[in-house]
Image (spheres, helix red, strand yellow):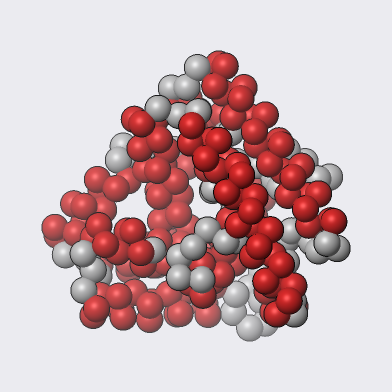
């Protein structure tokens, strides 16, 4: 159940951050809310084992994650805002403040995490990160500027993926609800896999080969239990 709940949390966070990123042209401004940013994800034990980091580096990555979470909590509390938020419930001034805080924190902490990894480890981390994003966001993961460039997506393909993404988001939480607890989580996971398949079908054979290279060797994402950012919610 803990794993199922963590999957639900990561899906919800990823869905929200994808919308924010789409509006901000692929920037990292809302990455404090993402379970898959480098500070959060590189502190996950399964990821560290895959990267082959030393015990000392693993310890430093975990400490950096904890410092990052504490800073997130403090920065938002200092201005009276909640780090987890619904953009539609904020004023324009509050949204801008969230963006500024997120950008500042990311600039402070992301380079520190990158510096703890070798070039090969960082490349592998990016592959794992992309696998997670593609599994949970499918269409939006392919439309990220750097990925779209690598895949050499045509304007027609981008339009098809954008249409698919609108359909994906609208059907993710249908009107009237669609079950509770485990039933709803299973529905979300089935929905996720359905649109991942649809996104791949838009690509040519050559683009599919490039996609596989971007993901690298398969990482067991079932082992990825994302850390939580908000104090009092557990680790």
In the rendered image, is residue 119 in sight? yes
Count of labels in the image: 0
Which quadrant of the figure has residue 92? Answer: bottom right
Identify which residue, 28 or 219, lies in the foreground.
28
In the rendered image, is residue 8 in sight? no
Identify which residue, 207 or 182, lies in the foreground.
207
Percent across and percent down for residue 122 are 40, 35
Q: Residue furthest left?
A: 206
On the rendered image, what quadrant is the C terminus found in?
top right
Position of residue 222 in the picture relative to residue 98 (left or right): left
Which quadrant of the figure has residue 52? Answer: top left
Q: Is residue 69 above or below residue 75?
A: above
Percent across and percent down for residue 158 are 30, 75
Percent across and percent down for residue 82 are 79, 61
Identify which residue, 86 or 132, lies in the foreground.
86
On the rendered image, what quadrant is the N terminus found in?
top right
Residue at the spot 50% in from the left edge and 17% down from the top edge: 54
Percent across and percent down for residue 172 are 54, 72
Residue at the spot 59% in from the left edge and 79% down from the top edge: 174
Residue at the spot 57% in from the left edge and 16% down from the top edge: 56
Position of residue 153 in the picture relative to residue 100 (left or right): left
Which quadrant of the figure has residue 88? Answer: bottom right
Residue at the spot 23% in from the left edge and 60% down from the top edge: 151
């Amino acid at each position: 159940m803990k794993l199922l709940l963590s999957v639900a949390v990561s899906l919800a966070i990823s869905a929200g951050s994808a919308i924010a990123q789409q509006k901000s042209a692929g920037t990292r401004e809302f990455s404090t809310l993402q379970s898959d940013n480098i500070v959060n994800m590189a502190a996950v034990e399964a990821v560290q084992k895959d990267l082959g980091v030393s015990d000392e580096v693993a310890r430093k990555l975990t400490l950096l994650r904890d410092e990052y979470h504490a800073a997130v909590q403090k920065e938002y509390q200092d201005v009276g805002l909640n780090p987890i938020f619904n953009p539609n419930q904020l004023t324009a001034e509050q949204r801008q403040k969230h963006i500024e805080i997120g950008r500042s924190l990311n600039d402070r902490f992301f380079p520190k995490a990158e510096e703890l990894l070798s070039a090969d480890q960082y490349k592998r981390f990016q592959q794992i990160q992309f696998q997670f994003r593609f599994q949970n966001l499918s269409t939006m993961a392919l439309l990220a500027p750097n990925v779209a460039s690598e895949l050499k997506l045509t304007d027609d393909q981008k339009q098809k993926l954008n249409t698919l993404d609108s359909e994906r988001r609208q059907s993710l939480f249908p009107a009237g609800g669609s079950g509770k607890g485990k039933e709803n989580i299973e529905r979300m996971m089935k929905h996720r896999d359905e649109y991942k398949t649809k996104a791949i079908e838009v690509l040519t054979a050559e683009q599919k080969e490039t996609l596989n290279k971007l993901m690298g060797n398969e990482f067991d994402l079932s082992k990825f239990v994302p850390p939580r950012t908000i104090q009092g919610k557990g680790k």
